[in-house]
Image (spheres, rainbow, N blue to C red):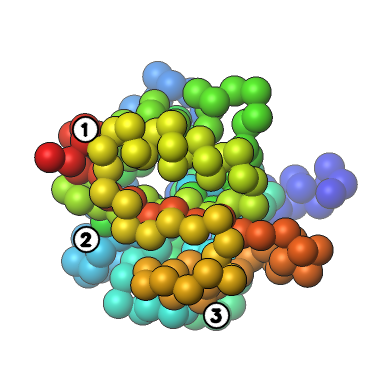
Amino acid sequence: MGKKKKLLRFAENETFPNLFQWPSVPETPDMAMKGQWGASYFKNAAPLVLELGCGKGDYTVGLAQLDPTRNYVGVDIKGARLWRGCRNALERGLPNVAFARIQVEFIEKMFAPDEVSEIWVTFPDPQPNKARKRLTSPMFLARYARILRAGGLVHLKTDDYDLYDYTLNEVVRPAGYEIVASTADLYREEAPGFELARAVQTYYEGIWLAAGKTIKYIAFRLNGEGKPNS
């Protein structure tokens, strides 16, 4: 994308009513929206679902269309990508969609304890040489646990086997988290709990499937303190 086009998108982002941006400065105070998503923006008490690393918001918008009884917030740091998600949500008239521009490591600046019901991590950077930076590493799961309601679900959808194996066998199982669903081949295996993960496909997911790649999926529960469930 050219620099001029990107700047135009950044400027339009400032006008979107469904986009909230937090400066990438750790010392910046928490966002005023923290703890107020239901009351101040969505104007209801429906469950709040996040998509982390949402890119252009394909999954966020898709889930919101499927289930208007829940509120959805797509989270990403790339403003030019979020521009597309914001536009799509507004053009489709979806009142249960918003987007937040923030680095995931600062997620607690944007969301309060017990404010979130579920988290989707869809096709994140697998970080092959930096396990600590994976969005399903213990460091990130501890952050999610502090904003999730007790027993809140975390979903991972990826085409990367190493990330899937790491999450399942090096993080989730050792921690004792409850595994709700797990498969190394989402579209070929049959088991309860895969329906929602199959219901929405991102643009790139379609390309990977057409190329013969398999999609991996895990859903597991965290308790409110980020410790193993007893």
| Apparent side of residue 1 relative to residue 158 in the rendered image (left or right) | right
Please, is residue 35 above or below residue 133 in the view? Answer: below
Answer with mark 3 or mark 2, whichever residue precedes in sequence: 2
- Residue at 43 percent across and 32 percent down: it is 170
Q: Earlier in the sequence, mark 1 or mark 3?
A: 3
Q: Are marks 1 and 3 in contact (CB under 8 Å)?
A: no
Three-letter code, disc 2: Ala
Q: Nearer the viewer, mark 1 or mark 3?
A: 1
Amino acid at dot 3 = Arg
Judged by depth in the image, the label closer to the viewer, 2 or 1, is 1
Q: Is residue 14 above or below residue 169?
A: below
Residue sticking out furthest to the left: 230
Is residue 149 or residue 38 the one in the foreground?
A: 149
Question: How far apart are the alpha carbons under marks 1 and 3?
Answer: 39 Å
Q: Position of residue 214 (x, y in %)?
A: 66, 60
Question: Label 3: which residue?
Answer: 92
Label 3–label 2 contact, CB within 8 A: no
The residue beneath circle 1 is: 227
Residue type marked 1 = Lys
Quick one: SS at disc 1?
loop
Q: Position of residue 215 (x, y in %)?
A: 61, 59
